Image (cartoon, rainbow, N blue to C red):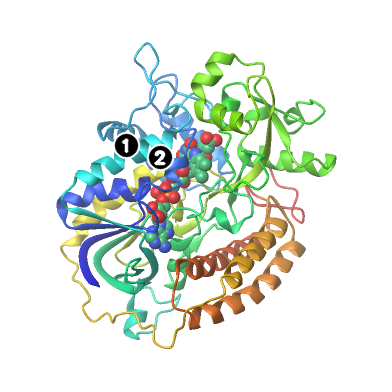
Amino acid sequence: MRKKVDFLVIGSGIAGLSFALKVADHGEVCIISKNKAEETATKYAQGGIAAVMYTPDTYEKHIRDTMIAGDELSNPEIVRIAITESTDRIKELIEWGTQFDKKDSGQYDLAKEGGHSEYRVLHHKDSTGLEIQRALLCQVQKHPNISLYENYFTVDLITQHHLNIEVNKKTNDVKCYGAYVLNPETKEIDTILSKITLLATGGAGNVYSTTTNPELATGDGVAMVYRAKGIIEKMEFIQFHPTSLNNPGETPSFLITETMRGFGGILKSHSGEKFMNKYDERGSLAPRDIVARAIDTEMKISGDDFVFLDCTHLDENKLITEFPTIYAKCLSIGIDITKEMIPVIPAAHYTCGGIKVDEYARSSIENLYASGECSSTGLHGANRLASNSLLESAVFSHRASIDSIKKRSSITYCNEVPDWDSSGTVLNEEMVLITQTHQELQSIMSNYVGIVRSNLRLRRALDRLQIIYRETEELYNKSILTTQICELRNLINIAFLIIKMAQNRKESRGLHYSIDYPKTRNNI
Ligand code: FAD
Ligand code: SIN
């Protein structure tokens, strides 16, 4: 198939869907998702979306909290944009049908998470993402200009490289003409030409063995931009969520939302010690990097495989009403959270870095925008403040829509783009080559490039990565393409970017902690 659309949107989470809704009155929109459209990380968001709604909260307080969480590495201009536009974007989500919980007074019920100085997290019980995903998808399905291509896998962006024009990192006029996508029915690679392309492909948590991210989070968008010679940044800042449910064998790891700690839950060791107070005066509600590192330290010292989150002292009825999903999940594995402590461990949760974009979500590649977790806007700096990511997606997809609507009429399709050439490739009949390598990759990253790093561990990781990179490139070049081989190749790209950027950061900062550079602020 060869197709032309005004707006090609790769991703059906909050970033992709909200952009699509905004541009759809201005041209034909095609949304690609590699699974069913509702299967996204957005759907799994529990805690909520941060925004300034009422006094005593102010934009200045939210800006300050974001800068502190980001260890002062966030871009102050971008932080100001995201926070001061937060209230309008929330109103829009509500207009699109999202139902956030309210108090009896009629005001929205705001929760608090680690690093927030005020109650400002709008939520829908403990399944906020599911509610946002539902509302947006419902609007998208009603719009006559939007088509949804489910189970299509985007393999690569199309640039001048495909016209045999040399493109390298120094070429600053790389242009995006659309994308090559794997058609699930024909198993062939289709060509989609677009005037504007938005990458909204989400995170890359599956580069680690333990992650809260759904299986789809394989960093495809970031890897595609890297191959297309676009700019990627800050990949060393991988956020580990301190509290995922310790339920060995379950993937992804089930999240125990931070709002449970905002609600009064306390982290405890096996001996019952409230250990967080040793590490930070904010105790269990310190920013995530500090809490995750503290748990990692406690587990290493004690030799235990997990710590506990204790909610047994909290009001039983309120706990069940506020956290029905978590209550039911824990009960399903035999833990009654009103009576027993919850075993928790840190898990890879959020990719702070990604495709570098400006204040209108423009990437370094012409006509290519990026929004959501695959992008690096500068909002998160060295660490992301809880519940700022759904907000970031809404704000920068909105801004991308403003810029791309203006630009669209001056862009023409590049008809010279050739169709994908798969000559000489054969079906790979040994899935083990892919599954085993994926496990090796996750093991390298979890053991050497996790919460605590060192120069030696990073060097070891890179040496081992080089072997599986070479093997996988060989396999890729001779295989008829499948989603699995493409995802593995992308994850190897992601691992390389994380390790290289971690090696280049010769300090401990925010989420990147190295025992070789221990003496910077925020360190334990
Ligand atoms: P996603 O929602 O992940 O969507 C990615 C889309 O891209 C999918 O449609 C996928 O099919 C598509 N895609 C990817 N690669 C390809 C490809 N090669 N071809 C075609 N399609 C592709 N953030 C908050 O702010 N508040 C929270 O409370 C919160 N809780 C969270 C809880 C969990 C368990 C997790 C995992 C994350 C949480 N986050 C939270 C983070 C937040 O959910 C994500 O950062 C955000 O939803 C990302 O949205 P997105 O639109 O960028 O990507
Ligand atoms: C959570 O609910 O703890 C996750 C919030 C987030 O990742 O922003």
Location of the N terminus by quadrant is bottom left
Amino acid type at image mark 1: Arg
Circles 2 and 1: CB atoms closer than 8 Å: yes
Ligand 1 is within 8 Å of the C-beta of the residue at disc 1: no
The answer to whether residue 212 is above or below residue 454 is: above
Question: If you read the primary sequence from the N terminus, does the residue marked by circle 2 or circle 1 appear first?
Answer: 1
Amino acid type at image mark 2: Leu
Q: Is residue 385 at least partly visible in the picture?
A: no
The answer to whether residue 167 is above or below residue 306 is: below
Q: Nearer the viewer, residue 36 or 163?
A: 36
Residue occupied by mark 2: 391
Q: Nearer the viewer, residue 412 or 82?
A: 412
Pinpoint residue 175: horizontal percent, then vertical percent: 32, 72
Location of the C terminus by quadrant is top right
Which residue is depicted at the point 36% across and 45% down?
A: 14
Q: Is residue 270 at least partly visible in the picture?
A: yes
